[in-house]
Image (cartoon, grey):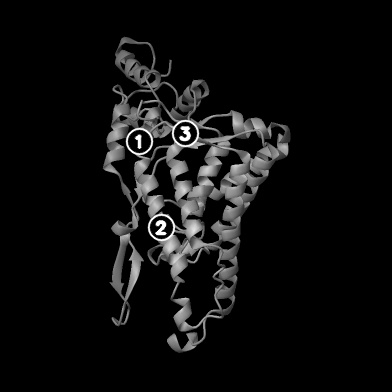
Amino acid sequence: DAVGYADGHRADREALAGVLCSGSWRPGQLAEMIEKQNIFLMRTLPELIDNVAASAKTSPMAVSKDGYWADHWTYCMDLIESYLQIYPDREEKFLYDELLPYFYSSRVVRPRAQKYVLSRSYNGQWHHVRQLHPTFEDPSRLEQMRHYVNDSSGWYKTEAHYHHNKGGTIVESAPIAKLFLLATVKFATRDAYGMGIEYEGGKPGWNDAMNGLVGMLGSGMPESYELKVLLNYLKKAAGKYRRRVIVVPEELAALIGKITDALDELGDGEYIPPIQTEKTINEVPSALFQYWDTVATAREEYRSDMVSLSGRVKEYSSSNVIEIIDRWIRQVDLGIARAHIIGSHGFEGGDELL
């Protein structure tokens, strides 16, 4: 009844009903469509939106712009902790028995070869590496999404924003598996010294004053501490529910395997820097740099594989997960220790270079 029942309103009513009943839409899209089509409403627009939203099924959605904020993932643990404060008895069911899809974004992070550039220093005496335009709209992903367009409205269907396997089925995993994936990707995104999580997505954390750090290959220590919180929770959950397995896409398992191989090659050296000199602060130990390059390459290969998932999976037992996470926590702790030394002492001769 929002557009009336008179013959003059029939076209408006049918157009609006066709959009509402033929697929997903966002409130803003609906409002924009009503305005562009000059649909006459007998109720206010907010009333119409409220009424249709009350009867609609909601689906998580997001739109990309020009990058990814480095800290948004850290709120996951805040939400989990809040939920478990109210429903502590539902933890196992929540972690292992629910299934969630994987969001499919057309905007992806460029590999280093496409975003790292050499720029002259302010005095023209040397070059330094910068990171420019770190994300882009991937044509191959956009093509994949075009298979899921609503013919009535021209908008993407909900399915367009979810990962599918090569058979066309939406890929789903338990929350524990998705948290394991999140921890894996963030562990694989630590900087060359293993201290902070790289600002590789074009945005820093919540503090906008740090925007310039992105172009300077900056990384954030707050995110490293958040990674440790996530790893400790995963370890605790895996130990608490030892009879359960974690099932992940084989593409993630491949990345985990490459990280394990790189850690084997790195060995048990702590690489704790001495009080810094001009030379040592600018030189990452070769073993750490090789590890960083190997893992960053594996991360880039993983993202390339994620355009279309195979649908095959790998199971990890609780003991496997705990063993992996213990190793990762040790590396995070070593990175934090390095940051304490460099951040607390700087390097000798610094005043002369200012």
Residue drawn at 70 percent across, 39 percent down = 240
Residue type of the residue flagged with mark 3: Val
Mark 1 nearby-residue class (10 Å; few <14, some 14–19, many ≥20): some
Is residue 65 visible in this depiction of the protein?
no
Percent from the top left, x then y, of residue 139?
Answer: 26, 42
Q: Dot 2 corresponds to which residue? A: 294
Q: Earlier in the sequence, mark 2 or mark 1?
A: 2
Q: Dot 3 corresponds to which residue? A: 313
Mark 3 nearby-residue class (10 Å; few <14, some 14–19, many ≥20): some
Percent from the top left, x then y, of residue 315?
Answer: 53, 35
Given this view, does label 2 or label 1 mark the residue nearer the observer? 2
Between 26 and 60, which is closer to the camera in this rendering? 60
Q: Dot 1 corresponds to which residue? A: 308
Residue drawn at 57 percent across, 79 percent down = 345
Decide: is 21 above or below 231.
Answer: above
Are the residues flagged by discs 2 and 1 in contact, CB closer than 8 Å? no
